[in-house]
Image (spheres, rainbow, N blue to C red):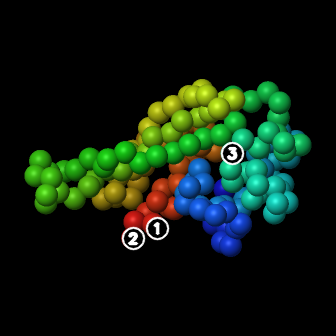
Amino acid sequence: MPVEKLEGGNWPHPSRLPLGSGWTGFCTAPGHEGETPAPQTLENECNLGYASSCAWAPTERNWDGVRFAVSAPSTDSKRVETARPSTLRLNYVCERCHRPADHGFLDFDLSNSTWAQTHPDPRIQKMAECFLQSYMQRRS
């Protein structure tokens, strides 16, 4: 579960990480809820998704990793050249064994800084919020 941005990681391109940058946080795996993984595990497994070599990862799970992308924002105006985006759509894909297992989108209302809907899994919702934070920081 990501909590705080991890500055100074050893990734050649942190913006290419699944959440748009590195994050510290705690584990949500059964039997290890709330524990903080070792720094090397956070950097080499948790932040990359697919932590299959992690001893804490449950063998039975619905997905291995989650990927996010921003699709074109919708606007309030029909005139594209003067329109300001009102909603940012985050597309997500939950992957299992490098294949899509679930997918959908989450809309973020830019004018109110609120989610139009949230994901029912709080882990995916938190990851979406972290991805959005990384995305917005890169765009500002």
Disc 2 to disc 1: CB gap under 8 Å? yes
- Direction left: furthest residue: 79
Q: Secondary structure at mark 3?
A: loop
Circle 2 packing at 10 Å, graded few (<14), some (14-19), many (20+), is: few
Circle 3 packing at 10 Å, graded few (<14), some (14-19), many (20+), is: some
Q: Is any atom of residue 4 visible in this view?
A: no
Q: Quadrant of residue 138?
A: bottom left
Q: x, y (%) of residue 37?
A: 83, 56
**Vertical relation: 111 (above or below) 98:** below
Q: Quadrant of residue 85?
A: bottom left
**Quarter of the picture holding the C terminus:** bottom left
Q: x, y (%) of residue 13?
A: 59, 62
**Mark with earlier residue (3, 1):** 3
Relative side of 108 to 66, left or right: left
Disc ID at residue 137:
1
How far is the residue under mark 3 from the one under mark 1? 22 Å
Q: x, y (%) of residue 64?
A: 70, 36
Give the residue type at disc 1: Gln
How far is the residue under mark 3 from the one under mark 2? 26 Å
**Vertical relation: 27 (above or below) 15:** above
How far is the residue under mark 2 from the one under mark 1? 5 Å
* Observer-nearest of 126 and 61: 61
**Mark with earlier residue (3, 2):** 3
**Vertical relation: 113 (above or below) 49:** below
Tell me which residue sits at (82%, 34%) in the image.
58
Pair 3/1: label in front: 3
* Observer-nearest of 81 and 25: 81
Q: Which residue is identified by label 3?
A: 49
Q: Which residue is identified by label 2?
A: 140
Give the residue type at disc 3: Gly
Tell me which residue sits at (12%, 47%) in the image.
78
Q: x, y (%) of residue 27?
A: 78, 50
